[in-house]
Amino acid sequence: MKLKKSTHLAWNILIHSKLRSWLTIIGIVIGIASVVSIVSISLGAQQQVQNQLGNIGANVLTVTPGFSKAFGSSGFVGGGGGFRVITRNGGPGEGSSSSSTTQKNLTINDINTIKGVSNVEYVMGEISNRETVSYLTKSATLDITGVDTSTWSEVTTETLSSGRFLSSGDSNAVVIGQNVATSTFSNIPLNSKITVDGKTFTVVGILSNGNGIYVPIDQARNMFDVGGTDYQSISVKISNVKEANATVTAITQRLMLERGEIQASQQDFSILNPSELQSTIEQTTGMLALFLGAIAAISLIVGAIGIANTMFTSVLEKTREIGIMKAIGAKNKDILMIFLINAGMIGFVGGIGGVVLGAIGSGFIGSLASGAATGGGGFGRLFGSTALTPALLIGALLFSIIIGMIAGAIPAYRASKLKPVDALRYE
């Protein structure tokens, strides 16, 4: 019997099946939809993490004052759409953990020490504060960051939407974030004049995103009334990301020696390593996806049992028809093929419905998570995006077909082994 004929007969069996067959298909639809939704949300979360870490820059380490016992030398927490270093100087994360020693500020000596470490390409100190910013008739309190104009363009992971970065020789110039230009003040074009803490600056660049303003560090020191050569953080750009962990170790050792800290318990600074952070979070999201996928797979197992039950019943109902087909020349392999194709069709129809329902479901869950993110939820931002890739959709459909054929294998085999005389006498 030709494959085309077997497929036609299998399709007729499916079309004329009773309600239990379509209930079985619904079970497969729910199982596949669950898997598609969970996997797409997990993939979207992983992409969101990668995008956030891309904004930090895997090749840029950040040194901050204060050492966190709870989180180690790479202390960080998530939330607010990004990651922030945990210190104990009244900055983000205060109160989340304790510091092992009395904190000392970062200084120009620390920068010079870090510059002597191999694999270090650029080093830049920063200071920041919140100040009143005015444009035309509107004012707002925003984050102001003072940067070294000679190295900022080499170290920063920010991208420009227009204009340029700050460079050596700039004094009364600023670069502003996209949200400052378009949302906070409606529309600030390049070369506009804005007032920061009563001083006038020219906008020379607008970043692709962000809510802050960058100014030359000397201007920032005058603005914040902070003298000397202390820094709130130091950004370190490295040449080879693969050697990031070794570089962190080398910097730690050099800084402890330079700061007169002999024991590890005396360490009073933290180093954020984005590449290590990325690996940790990817492992966590991967485990979460595996766990949720395993839960969703239970419904697929139930659906497979339903297919097997439906196929056994179908074989019993079609016993006389099987006897007739064998009597007129159908072979065992022909009967086997018909019922295997029928089981695969059940999986295929269920897979199509599951893929469609899963795509709709993942979009709905993503929109709910995005709504939660609007209220400030960190997990909402993480799970607010989905990733429906062709590989996921095709893979889910093929998996559904394979599940159907595996579940129908034993009933199909039993049907093929029926003897024509016994099948014809069956009532």
Image (spheres, rainbow, N blue to C red):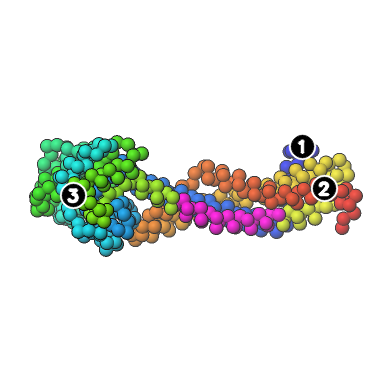
Amino acid carrying mark 3 in the image: Arg
- Which residue carries the number 2 mark? 417
- Which residue carries the number 3 mark? 259
Task: Kindly identify the residue that appears in the image at 80 percent across and 55 percent down.
Answer: 316
Q: Identify the element where label 2 is drawn.
A: loop
Query: Residue 213: horizontal and vertical position, in percent?
Result: 20, 48
Q: Nearer the viewer, mark 1 or mark 2?
A: 2
Q: Identify the element where label 1 is drawn.
A: loop
Q: Is residue 423 left or right of residue 207?
A: right
From where the camera sits, is residue 409 visible? yes
Query: Residue 53: horizontal and vertical position, in percent?
Result: 34, 46
Q: Nearer the viewer, mark 3 or mark 2?
A: 3
Task: Kindly identify the residue that appears in the image at 21 percent across and 38 percent down.
Answer: 116
- Mark 2 or mark 3, which is nearer the start of the sequence? 3
- Which residue carries the number 1 mark? 2
- Mark 3 or mark 1, which is nearer the start of the sequence? 1
Q: Identify the element where label 3 is drawn.
A: loop
Q: Is residue 49 left or right of residue 33?
A: left
Quarter of the picture containing the C terminus is: bottom right
Question: Majority secondary structure of the magenta segment?
Answer: helix
> Camera-side residue: 336 or 71?
71
Task: Kindly identify the residue that appears in the image at 29 percent across and 49 percent down.
Answer: 272
Neighbor class of circle 3 (other Cα within 10 Å; few <14, some 14-19, many 20+) is: some
> Camera-side residue: 381 or 112?
112
> Camera-side residue: 168 or 320?
168
Amino acid carrying mark 1 in the image: Lys
Neighbor class of circle 1 (other Cα within 10 Å; few <14, some 14-19, many 20+) is: few
